[in-house]
Image: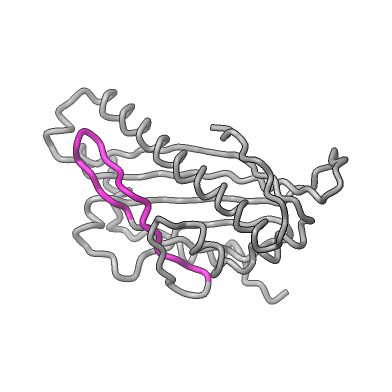
């Protein structure tokens, strides 16, 4: 196979620097970590091979579907993505993260974090993001309709480290942590819903297929 080895390429590109904020969470009380896990699925009215061909050509759909989030290409498989504002108690940052869309392994894909080449050192002292997503194509064994049906199942593990102002860290620890976790869930829920719907609509539109109705998010 001409595909690069998945494990070695992820290890090479996604290892955080020793100065990354995540390494300070145990020693700096102003650095807080917020984590969330999400999973959902979307219906695609086509066979898995057709969907895989579409997903392989991510230089088209990723830019179209990520809008209005800002996207900048970092290379043939990597992008810089500005997520939107994230904050706690009035303190806000607008994280930009580097994502690499890993080569397909049969019917599965992965998205991992990569270092941004020109990240402002001042920003790297404010936030750090670890984004890991998995996506797989699953045939629907119970499909009795006239059209093909494939489920695209995905999961996301997201961690955000933020250096909060000292005045905020004087508040009760449980309050600071729970409010940040809640806000992170809200932001990712909104982004994931929009991205899921846009990918679904973009695929069916580019293949002249009727798009399934929007499903209620599973999270």
| Whole-percent x, y for residue 118 in the image | 29, 70
Q: How is the image coloured?
A: one colour
Q: Is residue 2 above or below residue 165?
A: below
At 40% from the left and 68% from the top, the residue drawn is 72
| Whole-percent x, y for residue 54 in the image | 66, 64
Q: Which residues are magenta?
A: 77-95
Q: Is residue 3 above or below residue 92?
A: below
Please tell me which residue lies in front, 152 or 196.
Answer: 196
| Whole-percent x, y for residue 162 in the image | 27, 44
Quadrant containing the N terminus is bottom right
Drawn side of residue 107 relative to residue 156, left or right: right
Q: Is residue 76 above or below residue 145?
A: below
User: In this figure, what is the number of numbered marks?
Assistant: 0
| Whole-percent x, y for residue 185 in the image | 42, 35
Please tell me which residue lies in front, 172 or 84.
Answer: 84
Q: Residue 215 occupies which quadrant of the picture?
A: top right
At 26% from the left and 57% from the top, the residue drawn is 124
Q: Is residue 75 magenta?
A: no
Q: Is residue 13 above or below residue 44?
A: below
Drawn side of residue 111 relative to residue 136, left or right: left
At 59% from the left and 33% from the top, the residue drawn is 216
């Amino acid at each position: 196979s001409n595909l690069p080895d998945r494990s070695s390429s992820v290890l090479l590109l996604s290892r955080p620097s020793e100065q990354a904020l995540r390494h300070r969470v145990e020693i700096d009380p102003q650095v807080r970590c917020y984590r969330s896990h999400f999973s959902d699925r979307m219906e695609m009215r086509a066979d898995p091979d057709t969907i895989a061909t579409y997903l392989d050509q991510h230089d088209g759909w990723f830019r179209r579907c990520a809008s209005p989030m800002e996207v900048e290409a970092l290379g043939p498989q990597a992008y810089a993505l500005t997520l939107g504002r994230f904050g706690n108690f009035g303190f806000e940052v607008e994280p930009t993260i580097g994502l690499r869309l890993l080569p397909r392994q049969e019917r599965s894909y992965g998205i991992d974090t990569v270092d941004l080449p020109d990240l402002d050192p001042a920003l790297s002292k404010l936030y750090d993001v670890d984004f890991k997503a998995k996506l797989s194509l699953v045939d629907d064994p119970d499909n009795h309709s006239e059209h093909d049906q494939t489920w695209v199942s995905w999961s996301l593990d997201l961690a955000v480290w933020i250096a909060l102002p000292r005045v905020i860290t004087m508040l009760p620890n449980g309050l600071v942590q729970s409010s940040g976790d809640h806000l992170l869930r809200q932001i990712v829920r909104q982004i994931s819903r929009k991205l899921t719907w846009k990918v679904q609509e973009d695929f069916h539109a580019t293949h002249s297929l009727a798009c399934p109705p929007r499903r209620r998010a599973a999270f």
